[in-house]
Amino acid sequence: MTNLSGLESQKKPKTNKFAYACAVLASMTSTILGYDIGVMSGAAEFIQKDLKITDVQLEILLGILNVYSLLGSAAAGRTSDWIGRRYTLVLAGAIFFAGALLMGFSTNYTFLMFGRFVAGIGVGYAMMIAPVYTAEISPAASRGFLSSLPEVFINVGILLGYVSNFAFSSLPLDVNWRVMLGIAAIPSVFLAVGVLYMPESPRWLVLQGRLGEAKKVLERVSTSNEEAQERLDDIKEAAGIPKDCHDEIITIEKKNSGGHGVWKELFIHPTPAVRHILIAGVGIHFFQQASGIDSVVLYSPKIFEKAGIQSHSKKLLMTVAVGFIKTVSILIATFFLDKVGRRPLILFSMGGMVVTLLVLGTGLTIIDQSTTPETFVIVLCVLSVFLFVTSFSMGMGPIVWVYVSEIFPLRLRAQGSSLGVGVNRLMSGIISMTFISLYKAITIGGAFLLYGCVAVIAWIFFYYMCPETKGTKLEEIEELFGKGRKNTDNKAAPADSS
């Protein structure tokens, strides 16, 4: 019976077309962040020349959106508990639409910074809620693949941003960067409208006491009525609702539906399991950014210039190659999440990042100290950049969002995920806003050697703190934490039959 059940669970995702469509559409909201990262990489040079700003102003401009997005991600948890996951996604698209228009019509540095403030709020909302919605609507057997889609679309957005740089770079200086930034308003409208046709998260509906609606949604995203009932029973149990309660609408205590007491449970009186989850969830977001990925993605033209590539068109083409490699790598990785598991891919990915960062740092140091650098060293640096983004996208890129959206218990998920995204965006902002100053202080090679050392610490952290969650029901994942190292290699396969 076990084997038959395993075969059945493997087939379910293939027939869950509606669940796949919902996950894809929700995840596409993440494209707006990716596009901003990619387009700012190439637009930065034009903005600096047109607005005549300093290097410090430039690095602040590039990285500040991530800090602004903290406000959005901080508000998104409570907002999504209040108005639902679906309307929070619509709100994210509407806010970014306004921000993109403001950036596109900016007349000076102050106006542009205000536009990035508004866009950052929208990005914060989208980054927090898209993974949560996708995880909550996906069955356990395909949750890893579907929950990784937000990161996939971030990379698609980065690639589109790089292509936009190359396509519009020939326009007049006072026009090209404004077109690059403003054109992002168009897809945000279509995404916001498309989300309106998606169902609400069944887990959110249960927390509102709307059991009848939750059951209908689960019947649409499950392969059978039996599976839908099983998932509904699991959600009700996690929400403290008796399984034998079959009312269409029930009254839920305010503390269970409004998010009150969540922060107290997370920080003041956490259980050992919740404390472990909090450390793992915040830590994985911290190290994803602290290992320097945004420095490579956002400043790749400058890195290639330091590596010896001086042609403007060649630098932009190389950044397009970075975006293409990054997108292809993450697409490949998504198909292994539910087969190989989260933990092995995290460790493999970070191991590759350690090696490539150290090689890139060494190569750039050699070039920096040479009057006529060898072609071999230049090629080595370029390959190191390509292999670094490949290593990142094969594990750390998609798994962070999957993992954090899974591990927090239902009652803590919105605020817990919001906290993780907040740490992620804060670190991204710090890395982005200090890279130019950092490499001027310790050389560009020294900067990447520093990132390599951080990556070593990250690998050790993941080895000891992150248990496997592959195939485990969301409602059962809390049991994997707070039990010490013996649980890090969890083989929770029985839940695959969910």
Image: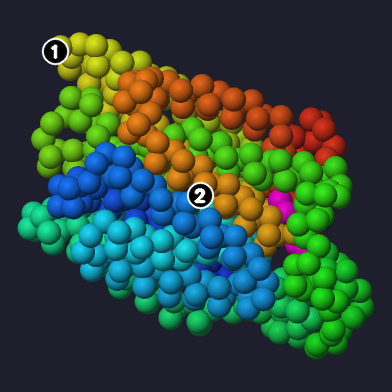
Residue at coordinates 69% horizontally, 37% vertically from top-left? 466
Extent of the magenta region: 407-411
Q: Residue furthest bottom?
A: 248
Q: Are marks 1 and 2 in contact (CB under 8 Å)?
A: no
Give the total number of marks visible in the rendering: 2
Q: Residues within 10 Å of mark 2 (few under 14, many from 20)?
A: many
Image side of residue 325 versus residue 341, left or right = left
Image location (x, y in percent) of residue 401: 57, 51
Image location (x, y in percent) of residue 433: 39, 41
Q: Nearer the viewer, mark 1 or mark 2?
A: 2
Magenta stretch, overall SS: helix
In terms of depth relative to the viewer, which is nearer, 419 or 53? 53
Image side of residue 218 versus residue 48, left or right = right
Q: CA distance from mark 1 to mark 2?
A: 39 Å
Mark drawn on residue 160: none
Does the magenta-highlighted stretch encompass residue 409? yes
Q: Locate the C terminus by quadrant.
A: bottom right
In terms of depth relative to the viewer, which is nearer, 395 or 66? 66
Image location (x, y in percent) of residue 414: 67, 62
- Which amino acid lies under the numbered mark 1 shown in the image of this protein? Thr
The residue labelled by disc 1 is 372
Residue 370 against residue 336 in the figure, above or below: above
Image quarter of residue 282: top right
Does the magenta-highlighted stretch encompass residue 365? no
The residue labelled by disc 2 is 425
- Which amino acid lies under the numbered mark 2 shown in the image of this protein? Arg
Q: Locate the N terminus by quadrant.
A: bottom right
